[in-house]
Image: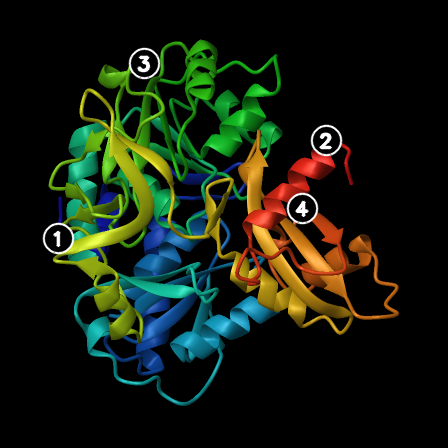
Amino acid sequence: MSETLTSVLAGALQDLRWPVESISGESRTAVELLSIADRVAQILAEHQVQPGEPIHVRIGNRPSDLGSLLGAWQAGAVAVPIHVTAAPATVSALLNATGARFLIDADRLEICGYAPPPDRPLLREDAALVIFTSGSTGLPKGVVIGHRRLAAKLAVLERLLAFRSDDVVLVPLQLTFIFGLWVSLLALHAGARLILVPKFSPDAITKGLGGGATVLAGVPSMFRTLLADPTISMPGLRMILTGGEVLPKPLAAGLQRTAPKAAIYDLYGLTETGSCDFVVGPDDQPDGRGTIGVPTEGVAFQIGETGELQIKTPFGMLGYLDNPQLTAAAFDNGHFNTGDLAGLDPDGRVQLVGRSKDIVSRGGIKIAPLEIDNLLAEHPDVAAALCAGVPDERLGEIIHAVVVLRKGSQLTPSALRDWMLARTERFKVPDAFYFTDALPAGATGKADRRGVATLFIASREGRI
């Protein structure tokens, strides 16, 4: 495989015989996508974009988005994917973090600022992407992904998964995240037909399956939703890719019954490590189900003294944007600290036993509860707030919030939810609110997130 993402994507489009499609109806030929890329590169050159300069790229799982990314790379810029539905406050926060002057939407340029961003040697070291992920501090972290490292990982995944030119790859995963991005790039490189799904729903997947899909990529929450419909059938699938959270044994069995010809690949990895560090492949099932399996090619691991899973990989991030201290702290003698607690099963497979961080995995999307705490605290009627993840059959985890109102407030959960929806993405808005006189506290008197789960259990049992 070519050594940069620029040459990977450009080469794939030059050889592609299928249009890239969306179930929304948009379709772009390879020639059209290459033309979009050329226009984007020309526009950025006319505005004197510097090598390694961060450029925001609006992403909505539209075929044209791939042309936008390629154009940014051809101009020597670093793409910062931002979803089309991102809340204005999120867009503003990312602009403050990157200092970007420009935003690209398809082949249109919007000017966000006029001062050149600071010189960042990290972004001149072969950087391709800055993907923002939630951090345990509540502040999003800008993970800098390198061209050559991710391209090399794509070569590993190409050998592992063996996509074919006659495949039809259905992707409901957002291209703002590394999982959706690498699946799409891999499909195009194999010459497969790529169908993007702007927003997941059972109807959207049914429509995609009706288009002849042979490969489906998703997170377990998507598959839970699909299998909730007893009429769903996926006999044409030859491969299912899943990741973002552990695939429970019952769900894996349900997928196998619904798609009996499909080889299931359960993949574990982080944005920081280049994704797909472990795999439970079809040859390791059903025995390996419930674990994250064994390392993929080139990946090594160890379990630290505290039980934390640590990963060593040549495909990982270049570092965190503007945060060398955080970058250094994330590693232990060359191994990335995942924050997940792990052990080995009797056959040597890695099994996750918990998380050392508070990050919530809601439908495979990682959310920092502290970020939600801080937003809730901005409401004039909220005196204090504490959020945590609680178990959910469909999404794996959902967010519950304990809220202490200021004296005399008449705020309702519905009004608070509407207020949050105007300020952040829907997936970050708590699924339930508990109005109480005080936050749950531990033995030391500090706010205790575990107490949120206690309230959830009491509510489920009808005790509150």
Would you say residue 143 is visible in this rendering? yes
Identify which residue, 433 or 421, lies in the foreground: 433
Residue furthest toward the bottom? 115
> Is residue 129 left or right of 219 when viewed as pictured?
left
Q: What residue type is disc 4 on?
A: Asp
Q: Which residue is drawn at 79% across and 54% down?
A: 413
* Residue with the mark numbered 4: 431
Sequence-first disc among 2 and 3: 3
User: Which is closer to the viewer, label 1 or label 2?
Assistant: 2
Residue type beneath disc 2? Glu
Please tell me which of labels 4 and 3 falls first in the chain.
Answer: 3
Of the two numbered discs 2 and 4 on the same chain, state the one appearing first in sequence: 4
Viewport quadrant of the C terminus: top right
Q: Give the residue displayed 61% in from the left and 13% down from the top.
A: 230
Tell us which disc is closer to us: 2 or 3: 2
x and y percentages locating residue 262 in the rendered image = 36, 16
Residue that mark 3 sits on: 286
Secondary structure state at the residue bearing disc 4: loop
Question: Residue 296 appears in which quarter of the rendering?
Answer: top left
Could you tell me how far apart the alpha carbons at marks 2 and 3 are, in whole angstroms? Answer: 34 Å
Q: What residue type is labelled 1?
A: Glu
Label 3 residue SS: loop
Quarter of the figure with residue 440: bottom right
* CA gap, disc 1 and disc 3: 36 Å
Q: Assess disc 1: are there few (<14), some (14-19) or many (≥20) residues with their C-alpha within 10 Å of its C-alpha.
A: some
* SS at circle 2: loop
Is 216 left, or right, of 407 in this rendering? Answer: left
Question: Nearer the N terminus, badge 4 or badge 1?
Answer: 1
Q: What mark, if any, has residue 461 been given in the picture?
A: 2
Q: Which residue occupies 48% across, 12% down? A: 258
Residue 228: percent from the left, percent from the top?
A: 60, 21
